[in-house]
């Protein structure tokens, strides 16, 4: 899985000035949808806005009050008066602190609830997505949308949105307060700030270039690491350690260089802003003092003290503003990625219901044409007739379209042309979930969940008792193996192995299907090499499983093929031969060649 280093999320603490952000294509539409989630908590949001206004107001007011304290009490050396007035100042500070706490307290709740709803809707969507969606999106990308992107939205709601609002509010109130004290003195920060912004933009622009380069280099470096970890066996077998090490060093160097440059350019920004800030501060003090001495513009010490505080306060939020806008942009882009998944046309589940108890299990493919992409048909005019209880074997070279045939029967994909009927009923008119309940599948890539063996088998039928689970395992010839494990049926399976071989995994999957007791069986045999004893076990298990059910078997093992009632030979998306093993063998055609080349070795053993 390849998560982009700063993907949707962007690690807040490390976001230096100039880091590039991904932008949303449809900002307005995305915000509208996001608002749909947030507005469910309108009252709380209103409380947050009030709290922000109170805390920003208290912030500016307390500065104002200190100015007044200087002019009214300190200058006149009225200390009892100052003590009384201090109570007011403390009260205003306390009010501001309370409002600020209250605001974050409520906002945390809003953010958590919103992300919870988004996560829930997104996860629900995942089940309804058609399979071709998964074909066209990398799993890492989907994972990242469910985790990073949703997290990004939450964090932004939680911190940045409120911050943005209070920054804008603080800037406006500060400008207003400065102008009301002395329009003349305000000119200094008003002139110096834009110069600072222009200068830092110059460096941000350059930093941005190298941050993009760094991101690209990091992605490539991660690629090398990922390939090395997941392909470790191949690397070892072909002795490619040295070459990979060299490749890694090259990428590692690139990353160092681009990272260096990006950081150097962005490191100019803070000192520049600070120096200009200090310049503005010093100039206000100097000119203010001068004006005060000359009695110009009715200034007082308190007012100058206020001006100094405001001039300082004015710079900070402006610095923050650019960063906040970036974060907001990346959150909107994250939200867009999330909503994109939700907007995908879901698999329609509605349709006629069928009962698996009364199903005979007659399957007919009539002139079926299908391609994963419209231009490129994989199956062409395929006709298959499986009578109830028959075993149909599909054989053919790799990539011929065997798995595709069963993908259509399960309606993982829908046919482009032709029809597939089940007991005479077009499967297009059946409800997908009802159809799938009639089908039992052992697929090529056996998937076991990270849960106990018992739970994995019970996945076939959730209400099965422990005895039924064990009975199914017995029929699948895997009971003995399981009971020999130290933890038996309670062994937790994980990706890392747990001493379970491919063949044993398949036997567990067979037990799972056995428990589900489907009317139609689909078996896509794994091509992996399995020792002869396990193979015999699988063989026996399959024969029991296929008994009395219509079965589609994609087989690589000769024994499975020979037992089939009918063999279909598929090549290049077409059925080119059809019949029993003996008749096809006698034809000396494609099957004969496939059979003699592929199975000769087995025959001789
Ligand atoms: N999800 C998919 N998206 C696009 N093309 C696909 C997809 N799955 C399979 N194909 C293509 O369809 C063709 C038939 O594939 P299919 O999986 O049916 O072969 P197969 O006969 O099962 O082969 P194997 O014996 O190797 O399992 C191949 O050319 C393959 O590249
Ligand atoms: Mg296949």
Image (cartoon, rainbow, N blue to C red):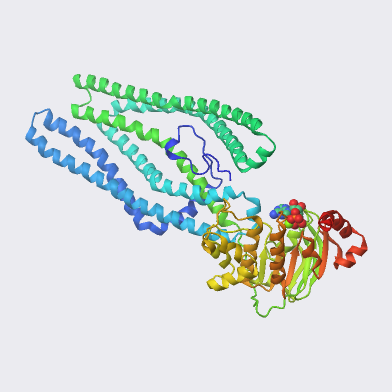
Taking 603 as reference, is 161 above or below it?
above
The answer, for residue 496, to whether it is visible in the render is: yes
Residue occupying the point 31% across, 46% down: 52
User: For this view, does 420 lie left or right of residue 509?
Assistant: right
The residue positioned farthest toward the bottom in the image shown: 358
User: For this view, does 521 lie left or right of residue 197?
Assistant: right
Residue nearest the viewer, comparing 603 with 126: 603
Image coordinates for residue 317, horizontal then vertical, percent: 36, 35
The quarter of the rendering in which ligand 2 is drawn is bottom right
The answer, for residue 464, to whether it is visible in the render is: no
Residue occupying the point 55% across, 25% down: 257
Image coordinates for residue 170, horizontal then vertical, percent: 32, 39
Taking 39 as reference, is 158 above or below it?
above
State the image quarter where residue 405 is shown: bottom right
User: For this view, does 212 lie left or right of residue 201?
Assistant: right
Residue nearest the viewer, comparing 604 with 103: 604
User: For this view, does 393 lie left or right of residue 10?
Assistant: right
Image coordinates for residue 288, horizontal then vertical, percent: 24, 23
């Amino acid at each position: 899985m390849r998560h982009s280093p700063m993907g949707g999320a962007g690690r807040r603490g490390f976001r230096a000035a100039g880091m590039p952000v991904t932008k949303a294509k449809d900002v307005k539409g995305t915000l509208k949808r996001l608002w749909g989630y947030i507005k469910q908590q309108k009252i709380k949001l209103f409380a947050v806005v009030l709290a922000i206004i109170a805390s920003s107001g208290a912030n500016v007011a307390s500065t104002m009050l200190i100015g007044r304290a200087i002019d009214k009490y300190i200058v006149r050396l009225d200390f009892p008066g100052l003590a009384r007035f201090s109570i007011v100042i403390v009260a205003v500070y306390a009010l501001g602190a309370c409002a600020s706490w209250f605001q974050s307290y409520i906002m945390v709740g809003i953010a958590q609830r919103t992300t919870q709803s988004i996560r829930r809707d997104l996860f629900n969507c995942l089940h309804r997505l058609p399979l071709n969606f998964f074909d066209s999106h990398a799993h890492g990308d989907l994972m990242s949308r469910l985790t990073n992107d949703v997290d990004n939205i939450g964090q932004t709601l939680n911190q940045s949105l409120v911050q943005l609002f209070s920054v804008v509010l603080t800037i406006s109130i500060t400008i207003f307060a400065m102008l009301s004290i002395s329009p003349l003195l305000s000119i200094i920060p008003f002139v110096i700030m834009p110069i600072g912004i222009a200068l830092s933009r110059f460096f941000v622009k350059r930093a941005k270039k190298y941050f993009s380069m760094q991101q690209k280099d990091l992605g490539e470096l991660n690629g090398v690491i990922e390939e090395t970890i997941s392909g470790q066996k191949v690397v070892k077998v072909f002795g490619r350690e040295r070459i990979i090490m060299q490749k890694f060093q090259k990428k590692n160097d690139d990353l160092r260089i681009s990272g260096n440059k990006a950081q150097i350019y962005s490191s100019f920004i803070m000192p520049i802003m600070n120096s200009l800030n200090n310049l503005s501060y010093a100039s206000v003090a100097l000119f203010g003092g001068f004006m005060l001495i000359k009695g110009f513009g009715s200034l007082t010490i308190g007012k100058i003290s206020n001006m100094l505080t405001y001039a300082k306060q004015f710079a900070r939020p402006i610095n923050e503003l650019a960063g906040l806008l970036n974060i907001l942009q990346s959150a909107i882009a994250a939200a867009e990625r999330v909503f994109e998944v939700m907007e995908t046309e879901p698999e329609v589940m509605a349709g006629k219901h069928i009962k698996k108890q009364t199903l005979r299990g007659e399957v007919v493919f009539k002139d079926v044409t299908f391609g994963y992409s419209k231009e490129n048909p994989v199956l062409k005019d395929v006709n298959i007739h499986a009578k109830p209880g028959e075993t149909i074997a599909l054989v053919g070279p790799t990539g011929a379209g065997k798995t595709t045939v069963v993908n259509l029967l399960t309606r993982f994909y829908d046919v482009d042309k032709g029809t597939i009927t089940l007991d005479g009923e077009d499967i297009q008119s059946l409800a997908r979930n009802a159809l799938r309940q009639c089908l039992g599948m052992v697929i090529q890539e056996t998937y076991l969940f990270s849960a106990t063996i018992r739970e994995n088998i019970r996945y076939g039928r959730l209400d099965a008792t422990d005895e039924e689970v064990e009975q199914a395992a017995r029929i699948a010839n895997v009971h003995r193996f399981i009971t020999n494990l130290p933890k038996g049926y309670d062994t937790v399976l994980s990706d890392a192995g747990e001493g379970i071989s491919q063949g044993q995994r398949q036997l567990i999957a067979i037990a799972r299907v056995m428990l589900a007791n489907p009317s139609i069986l689909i078996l896509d045999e794994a091509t992996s090499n399995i020792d002869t004893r396990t193979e015999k076990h699988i063989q026996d298990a399959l024969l029991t499983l296929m008994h009395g059910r219509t079965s589609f078997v994609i087989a690589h093992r000769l024994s499975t093929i020979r037992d089939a009632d009918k063999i279909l030979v598929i090549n290049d998306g077409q059925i080119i031969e059809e019949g029993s093993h003996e008749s096809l063998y006698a034809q000396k055609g494609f099957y004969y060649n496939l059979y003699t080349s592929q199975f000769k070795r087995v025959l001789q053993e």
